[in-house]
Image (cartoon, rainbow, N blue to C red):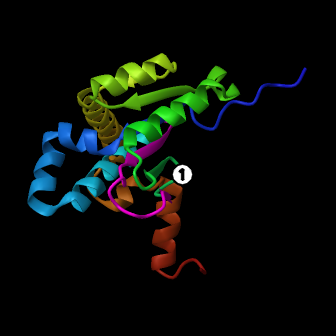
């Protein structure tokens, strides 16, 4: 009997970019001090590590409704991409369309679809399509939690028994390096 292939990502996370920027205090301040581009960059940077840690395929959606440009997609990492909507299309309509398509997609039986937004009307609409909901504040809490867990893992893994680099090398390698240093071993 053939084995079922697991999806590459355990969930697809659609993030309403400007909604989250407006909801996170740190991004609002970044936007007000340094402009929208810096706030977008800050959001994406926050989501890169989180998405990798969670195993999510994250799509950050930004409105381009007032710009006469075609929609575009910019791949940031394997886990994160930025989607700019078409001219006169909002992030809400982009996300709703993606949820509508996912509803009829067979991936729904193997993957979760999560929408991160604090827009109540948007939440109700995508919930009707079967997507899971995550508020912008809950997303922030999860991003911070993931960052703390990663830091904790790095701290415990990265600690060497002593303060010198040589203390973290196994004894056999240390001995070979010493002999090499004193000319007792050919390189």
Crowd around label 1: few <14 · some 14–19 · many ≥20 (10 Å): few
Residue 132 makes an appearance in the image: no
Residue 87 makes an appearance in the image: yes
Residue at 39% x, 53% y: name it: 168
Report the residue marked by disc 1.
Answer: 78
Task: Write down the quadrant of residue 19 in the picture.
Answer: top left
Residue 82 lies in magenta, yes or no? no
Count of marks, rendered view: 1
The residue at the far right in this view is: 1
Task: Write down the quadrant of residue 140 in the picture.
Answer: top left
Residue 48 percent coordinates (x, y): 40, 48
Q: Secondary structure at mark 1?
A: loop
Q: Nearer the viewer, residue 81 or 176?
A: 81
Quarter of the figure with the C terminus = bottom right
Is residue 1 found left or right of 126 in the rendered image?
right
Q: Nearer the viewer, residue 4 or 171?
A: 4
Residue at 38% x, 43% y: name it: 91
15 up-or-down from 38: above or below: above
Residue at 50% x, 47% y: name it: 79
Quarter of the figure with the N terminus = top right
Residue at 25% x, 29% y: name it: 141
Residue 64 percent coordinates (x, y): 37, 55
Residue 164 percent coordinates (x, y): 29, 59
Is residue 51 found left or right of 134 in the rendered image?
right
Residue 155 percent coordinates (x, y): 30, 42
Magenta range: 55-74
Is residue 13 found left or right of 27 in the rendered image?
right
98 up-or-down from 185: above or below: above
């Amino acid at each position: 009997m053939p084995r079922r292939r697991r999806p590459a990502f355990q969930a697809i996370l659609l993030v309403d970019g400007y909604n989250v920027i407006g909801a996170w205090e740190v991004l609002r301040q970044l936007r007000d001090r340094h402009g929208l581009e810096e706030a977008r960059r800050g959001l994406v940077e926050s989501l890169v590590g989180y998405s990798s840690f969670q195993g999510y395929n994250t799509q950050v959606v930004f409105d381009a409704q007032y710009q006469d440009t075609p929609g575009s997609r910019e791949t940031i990492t394997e886990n994160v991409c930025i989607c700019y909507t078409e001219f006169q299309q909002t992030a809400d309509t982009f996300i709703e369309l993606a949820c509508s398509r996912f509803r009829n997609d067979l991936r729904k039986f193997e993957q979760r679809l999560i929408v991160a937004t604090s827009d109540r009307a948007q939440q109700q609409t995508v919930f009707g399509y079967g997507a899971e909901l995550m508020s912008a504040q809950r997303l922030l809490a999860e991003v911070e939690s993931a960052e703390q867990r990663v830091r904790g893992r790095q701290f415990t893994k990265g600690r060497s028994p002593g303060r010198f680099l040589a203390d973290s090398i196994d004894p056999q390698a240390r001995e070979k390096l010493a002999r090499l240093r004193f000319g007792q071993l050919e390189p």
